[in-house]
Structure formats: C-alpha cells, structure tokens
Image (cartoon, rainbow, N blue to C red):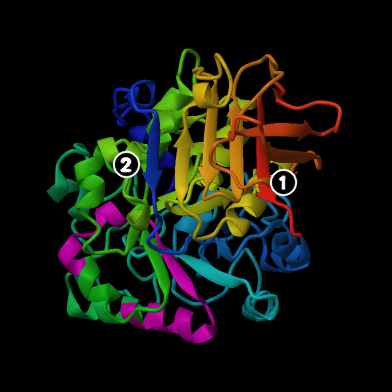
Amino acid sequence: MIKSIRSLFKNCATFVAVCFAALTITLTCYTPSAKADAIYHAFDECFASIKAKLPDIKTAGYDYIQVSPPNKTAARDDNACTSDKYWYIQYQPLDYALEGNLGTEQELKDLINGAHEKGIKVIADVVLNHLANYKNVAGHDIKPFPTAYPIFQEREYFHDKECIKDYNNSSEVENNWLCSQDDPEGLPDLKTGLPYVQEQQQNYLKKLLDFGFDGLRFDAAKHISRQDMQKILAVIPSDKLYYGEVIGKDYGESMSYIPVFPKVTDFQLVNTLKAAFGFGGDLRSLVNPSDTQRALPGKDAVTFARNHDTWAPGQFDNWKFDDGDLPLATAYVLAINEGTPLILNFDAFNPTVVAATQFHKKMDAQPQYYRNGNEIAANADNPNLLFIERGNKGLAIINKAGETFDFKAAKIPGLEVGCYDELQYNFKMCVAKGDDGQKYITEWGSKNRGGIEIGPRTALFFVKAEA
C-alpha cells in the first residue's frame, strides 16, 4: 500500500491481551497439515539485482521470491536499484504493462527463468484497487485524469472522488479514494464491480501467470469488496500460491477474507510477537497463539515479524521491533510449523534468520511441541526462554534476555538419542540415556561439558546429525 496512507493506520491495531497459557500447560502439541515454504521478499529490488543474488537466496533456503509490483509506474527521482526512498511509487500503477523502474520485461523474464533453474518460484505483488495520483507523482506531472491510464480512459471506470475518512466503515474503505495530508489528491479508486474493469484485471493476472509467475500477492485487499475480488481471482489456477494483504483490525476481520484468499497476512501474530518480545513480555505467551485467536490458523496465514510497510519510516511504529528483538522474532516465525513465512530482504541474510530458514526447511512436516522449561532444567521455565521441539529430530531455543542462561545439567525428553548439529554457531549437542532411563544432554559444544548454555539475545537451532 502507499506510503502516505499507511500513516493513517499506525494507531489502528489493537494489541491483544497476552495469554500465559504456557505457565499452566506443561506440553502442547501441533501437527502440521500442509507444507509452508519460506518467501524471500525482494522489496523494491531491481530484477537484475535479484537475479545476481539467486545463489545466496537458494543457499539460505528460500523457496519463493516475491518481487515488488512489476507494472508500469511514473518515473522515480531515485535509482530504484540502489535506493528505496520512493518505494511507494511502485504501488501506484499507470498501466498493467510489464515495464518500469525495477527493470525491463526481459530482465524480469531472465530473473524468473534463473529462479526456476534453481528450483525457486516467483511471486508478483499486484495492485488492483487504485491507479497513480493523476496530478503529480514524485514531482513528475502526468497526463490529466483519466487519460493518464491507457486502459481506463473513461471516468465511468472510477468511483467519484471522495477520500476515506472512517477506516472502520467498510463501504468507505471499498469505494472511496485513498488520500492523506501528504497526498490530498489521492489515488483514483477503480470500480472493480464493473465487468470491463474486472476483465482488464483478469487479463493482467493471466498475463503474469503466462509470463512465468508462480504466485501472486494482492495489495490493499480490504479496499476491494469480497464479491468483486472473488470474481477477479477466478482466473487463478488452484495450484498457484496467492494471498491477500489484509490488515485486519481483529482476528474476525482477518478470517473473513479466507473464503476469498487461501491465505492472508497475519498481523494478529505481529501483535502477539511485539508484546512477547517487548519489555516485560513473556515468550511463553507464544505457545500456540492461534488457539486463542492471537494468530491466524497456520494454513490460512502468511507470517512475518515485519514486512515492507512496518519497515517504512514513520509508519506503523507500534509494530516496529527493537533491533535486537527483530531477528529473534523472525526466528520464531521460521522455527514454528504454522504459516507461510515471509522474510523481508533487509532481514533475510541475518545469520540468525539464515539459520532459522535452514531449520524451517529441514524440519518440514515435523510435528511441533512446546517444551516446558522446567522439564529441561531447574528454573528454565522463564519468561525469556522458549523451547520448541520439532518431532524428535529438531529443537529451537530462543533467549530474549540480555544475559546468559547456563544450566550445568539438562534433560531433553523429546529428542532421539544421538548428536545434533547447531545451525548458526556450528557446534554439536549430544543426547544419551542416563542410568535412570531419562535422556540428558551429555555434550554441548565440548565433550567436557553437558547441560545447556544459551547466550544473551540468541536463537539456537539443532537438527539431528546424519549418521
């Protein structure tokens, strides 16, 4: 969505009360129902630049790449390949032609072909609700309204100009123009209920899929009625990944779009993560948050700690994480088996995030099990610690505290006997049965010590070593 409008939303999210279920529930278990692939969000990156990164994207473990809208927009006053200052121009279409600031049509084709050669799929970000500000875009005058738009040159294709004033009024949100103090002219809002408009938008979706895209992300989904959106999306084959950007004010509103989209963005989980990782928060509140509507059901959710909107300066400040918390919150998104993780390019190659992405890939289809800390070591049931077992072959540990936790003796009830490789710091943990028949950690980086030592503000990821 556009930069100028996002500021109107920054106080709209209601933080859900933190539930401390993990304090009273010793063990919880969840079995995945579907594969969840990690998406590298190539936000405002030029196509040629992404193509050059394909080896790194593949090595890190990402299965999809999501590119910013590839449609034609006005010119930018920055170099899109080296600057993100005018990123929001990409979300103001002039036309549905595949050309613009991020690269040529051939460069886009080369990126898709190169990704496919490496077994990576590509998602296009799609803007259907509106077109570009018709008077001035980043200082560049364009043709008068509506002649600026090659396929929508009649006023009848647009709602009458009236800015959205009440974002809790669905009729205004779906039919009025997006305007703000920074952009009083606003963005011309298409009448998506008209057969001609739907036909042009369906043609665009078919063009993207025929061009080689494997999935689609729909921006500003709440600004198009569910009925209109369902008709437009009818041309998408069932084997394609597609999802809607829905900034739901609550769980119910987010879930109301699931009949329209197979998946929607999980801003409820962002609320929950922000509370858990914030000062005084409790990581144990992250035990199965979807059970208490503090996150969407995994099969319906595209999950993240931040996306390009919450990254943008001056927008959604209530959803911004402290720098030290952000990699850990992203690690949680990747350590669990619910959701389809979306990882912003600014975060994607952080060492903690890369290790978490590898863990996510290696633990595909493994069931999930939150282990109460006291079952591992005395006093390990702590607001700053979270233990996530993945079947009996993997373990993720998150410590959000600024201090080390050192347990000289530790049990590990859920894992198989054997050794495990830690993916971020490259050391070994071994598990063996004691004389009492219980399983203990007998080696932690050195054969001379057992137990657990967890450094400050750290996430660890253990995977069963191959024999």
Please give the residue where the numbered disc 2 appears in the rendered image. Answer: 290
Q: From where the camera sits, is residue 293 visible? A: no
In front of the other: 303 or 384: 384
Per the image, label 1 sits on a secondary structure element best described as: strand
In front of the other: 98 or 168: 168
Q: Badge 1, how many Cα within 10 Å: few under 14, some, many 20+?
A: many
Measured from the top left, where is residue 86 in percent x and y? 58, 48
Question: For residue 285, which quarter of the picture?
Answer: top left
In front of the other: 90 or 393: 393
Question: Which residue shows up at 72% across the image and 46% down it?
Answer: 420
Residue furthest to the front in view is 435
Question: For residue 287, which quarter of the picture?
Answer: top left
Q: Give the residue type at disc 1.
A: Tyr
Over which residues does the magenta segment extend?
A: 202-228
Relative horizontal placement of residue 44, taking residue 447 as reference (left or right): left
Measured from the top left, where is residue 91 in percent x and y? 46, 56
Per the image, label 2 sits on a secondary structure element best described as: helix
Q: Are marks 1 and 2 in contact (CB under 8 Å)?
A: no
Above or below for 157 versus 401: below
Question: For residue 192, which quarter of the picture?
Answer: bottom left
Measured from the top left, where is residue 409 in percent x and y? 68, 21
- Tell which circle, 1 or 2, labels the residue nearer the N-terminal end: 2
Q: Any magenta on residue 203? A: yes
Question: Which residue shows up at 46% across the image and 71% down it?
Answer: 215
Q: Give the residue type at disc 2.
A: Ser
Relative horizontal placement of residue 380, taking residue 56 as reference (left or right): left
Distance in Å between CA atoms under marks 1 and 2: 30 Å
Please give the residue where the numbered disc 1 appears in the rendered image. Answer: 420
Quadrant of the image for the C terminus?
Answer: bottom right
Measured from the top left, where is residue 99 in percent x and y? 57, 74
Q: Any magenta on residue 62? A: no
